[in-house]
Image (tube, rainbow, N blue to C red):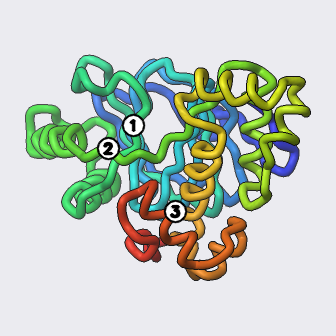
Amino acid sequence: MKTFTNRNWLSPEHYSMSKGPRPVHFRSYLIESNTCVSPHLHEFAQFHFARKGNMRLETADNCWIVPSHYGIWIPAYMEHAVWAMDDVFLESLDIETELLDETISMCQAVTISDVAKELIHHASETIPELYDEHGKDGKLVSVLLDIIFNLPQVDFVLPWPKNPALNEMCRTILESPGAEHYIEIWSAKVGMSTRNFSRKFKTETGLSFSLWKQKMRIFESVIMLKQNKSVTTIALEMGYSSTAAFSYSFKTILGVPPTEYAGQS
């Protein structure tokens, strides 16, 4: 994974990530703005809930945005890095693999229901490390797992190409999402003809270069909306000619207007 010098990089040892004494272990902690927890993996699965703040989660193959009040599943032994785009307050569950639903085999961003949100917070605040697995705390944990296993997925994932030059290009583009990023310029930079570039990019990501850029900008816009920026400001910063053009692009990708994602930072 590429290291960006403008990020404050921390090793995962900065946060306590040891295995808990029970099959489900709750953690609550702050990752400060513009901090990246460097690539690491766990022998258990994790469920991250961004109670406050916005982050990206990056693996070798994909990049997910996790806006405030959304969550993400991370399977065991999946190497990942977490980047806090502002102050992120995480409430997380470490879950032994034998308890997992069989569908949790890859990273998945999910929408958090109000019930799940409150139960995660309650459990994080009140359930002790050595909770009674057969008592009321154990029952609450079981109910919570049933709920989060069934949370609806949301398409907040951006694929990385496997080709090293294209991969680094995409990570570089993500640092300036509002720029034009013309295909003619980038294909020349990576040493390909425009035709070969287009074919290889589509083969490796499943998306055309223009659609990849569109999704990237809309995902970045979701974060900006959560940071209470106006639709007009975001449209201009993302390089759109008008708020109408931005809103149309947003609805094309996510199925709803930008106002659906505003607030709750």
Element at label 1: strand
Name the residue beneath numbered marker 3. 249
Work out whether mark 1 precedes mark 3 in sequence or the reverse, and give the earlier one. Answer: 1
Q: Is residue 227 left or right of residue 120?
A: right
Q: Amino acid at mark 2?
A: Gln
- What residue is drawn where x is 9% and y is 33%? 134
SS category of the residue bearing label 3: helix
For marks 2 and 3 on the same chain, the one whose residue lies earlier in the sequence: 2
Which secondary structure lies at badge 2? loop
Quadrant assignment, res 57: top right
In this rendering, is residue 112 above or below 264? above
Assign the N terminus to one quadrant of the image. top right
Q: Residues within 10 Å of mark 2 (few under 14, many from 20)?
A: some
Write the residue at 58% across / 38% down: 63
Q: Residues within 10 Å of mark 1 (few under 14, many from 20)?
A: many
Relative to 85, residue 12 above or below: above
Q: Which residue is mark 1?
A: 108
The residue positioned 15% from the left and 39% from the top of the image is 146
Q: Residue at x 68, y 60 (%)?
A: 33
Q: Residue 97 appears at what percent x and percent y?
A: 31, 20
The spot of residue 47 in percent (x, y) is 38, 39
What x and y, as percent, mark residue 234?
63, 73
> What is the number of the mark on residue 153?
2
Between 20 and 95, the one nearer to me in the picture: 95
Q: Nearer the viewer, mark 2 or mark 3?
A: 3
